[in-house]
Image (spheres, rainbow, N blue to C red):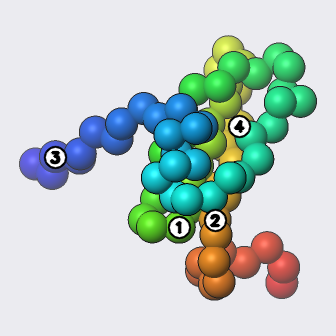
Amino acid sequence: MLQLQERPNLTVEEARAVLGLNFPAPSWLADYKYVNTVIHGNNMAKVQFNKGEQTVNFLISKGGENGIGTTG
């Protein structure tokens, strides 16, 4: 069986320090509660919020190409 490594819970400030990037974290999500920030590699962070069963994730990256396209 494959064991997944548990990801640490990071505050936005800790994730900013790890990435060396002062990325924005939305404060306009009044109904949502901040949950966690997950670091992906050396240049990406996922900021997670939830409201009950609903979850919102923001993927933030720094630097050049990251393999994620938003236009067709």
Question: Are the two marked residues, 4 and 2, in contact with CB atoms closer than 8 angstroms?
Answer: no
Quadrant location of the C terminus in the rendered image: bottom right
Q: Looking at the image, is mark 1 or mark 2 earlier in the sequence?
A: 1
- Depth check, mark 4 against mark 2: the one in front is 2
Q: Count all numbered tags in the image, as a single digit.
A: 4
- Depth check, mark 1 against mark 3: the one in front is 1
Q: Looking at the image, is mark 4 or mark 2 earlier in the sequence?
A: 4
Distance from disc 3 to disc 4, alpha carbons, whole Å, reads: 26 Å
Q: Amino acid at mark 1?
A: Asn
Q: Amino acid at mark 2?
A: Ser
Left or right of 20? Residue 30 is right
Q: Residue, x 52% and y 49% (percent of image)? A: 17
* Residue annotated with mark 2: 61
Residue 52: image location, x then y, percent: 67, 15
Q: Secondary structure at mark 4?
A: strand
Q: Looking at the image, is mark 3 or mark 2 earlier in the sequence?
A: 3
Q: Looking at the image, is mark 3 or mark 4 earlier in the sequence?
A: 3
Q: Looking at the image, is mark 1 or mark 3 earlier in the sequence?
A: 3
Rendered position, 36 above or below 15:
above
Question: Are the two marked residues, 1 and 2, in contact with CB atoms closer than 8 angstroms?
Answer: yes
Distance from disc 4 to disc 1, alpha carbons, whole Å, reads: 20 Å
Distance from disc 1 to disc 2, alpha carbons, whole Å, reads: 5 Å
Rendered position, 3 above or below 60:
above
Quarter-of-image position of residue 30? top right
Q: Which mark is residue 43?
A: 1
Q: Which mark is residue 29?
A: none
Q: Is disc 3 surrounded by few (<14), some (14 to 19) or many (20+) residues within 10 Å?
A: few
Q: Secondary structure at mark 2?
A: strand
Distance from disc 3 to disc 2, alpha carbons, whole Å, reads: 27 Å
Q: Is disc 4 surrounded by few (<14), some (14 to 19) or many (20+) residues within 10 Å?
A: some
* Residue annotated with mark 4: 56
